[in-house]
Amino acid sequence: MNYKRLLVTDADNTLWETDEVFAAAQLDLLQRVEEDYGVSVPNNDRLKFVREFDQALASRHPEGLKYPVHQLVRSIVSAIQNGDAELAINDALQRESPDPKAEAIANTFVARVLNVIPTLRLGVAKTVPALAQNQIRVVVLTEGNAERCERLLDHHGLRHSVFAVQAEKKTIETYAVLRSRYGGSDRPVMVGDQIDRDIEISKLAGYTTVHFPGGFNPVWTLNRQVVPDYAITSYDQIEPILGVATTADPRKRAARRGRN
């Protein structure tokens, strides 16, 4: 097939609703912490409570959101027992090995996140096959688990519409390599939910950027002054951006934000 254009798409919280899976797993983790350590969380918003520790750890750990989950368990337990969240987070980051209970809770969390099937986001089910049929080369770029991504694409019947799955850190060099390897003469397009990893970096690499906001925004992105070329509320709104005859409701139009 002679492809007309390259679309690079994020996976988690762009193709499917990963945040729902993480929210359920984080609440389950908190319940297991209370049961196994005999503590009680003094907070009505339990998800917010967990995510404050999650974001604090991710913002300080070299691996970001890929920090070891046992550190989340230990920081929560320590904060409840000692009443000092800041000290608890620092202690958890410095702890080299988890205790058996923390490790068991962390393993359950990871298994749940990897094995639960998230639902597709609005417009994805029809749009990805339509793009492939219209000679758009669709490449999935994820910083998550490659096998999980492949499995989810298969489960949702999308794998045959995706040309390739690339699992690696999102850098300017990564986007440049994808453009060189898979792109044609036209400017490639990147669509994703994260304003930093998906939009800011791909924009620097010369992509047309499409922001598809999801339910989760890391704290370090909230004040980022990045303007995408387009913002969409449904995945099918990307079709006219790529020059594809749209199958979307004509009232659904991508909002152009302007270029910097």
Image (cartoon, rainbow, N blue to C red):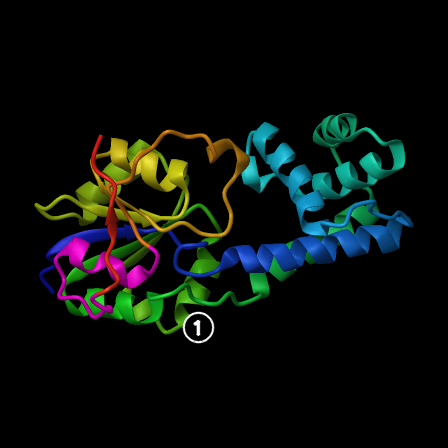
- Position of residue 48 measured from the top left corner of the image (x, y, whole percent): 67, 46
Which class describes the residues within 10 Å of circle 1: few (<14), some (14-19), or many (20+)?
Answer: few
Quadrant assignment for the N terminus? bottom left
Q: Badge 1 is on which residue?
A: 155
Q: Amino acid at mark 1?
A: His
Element class at badge 1? helix
Furthest residue toward right: 38
How many marks do you count on the picture?
Answer: 1
| Position of residue 183 in the picture relative to residue 108 (left or right) | left
Q: Residue 191 location in percent, x, y?
A: 31, 49
Position in image of residue 198 (x %, y %): 36, 42
Q: Which residues are magenta?
A: 233-250
Hey, which quadrant is residue 225 in on the image?
Answer: top left
Q: Name the residue at 48% across, 67% down.
A: 119
Q: Nearer the viewer, residue 143 or 28?
A: 28
Quarter location, residue 245: bottom left
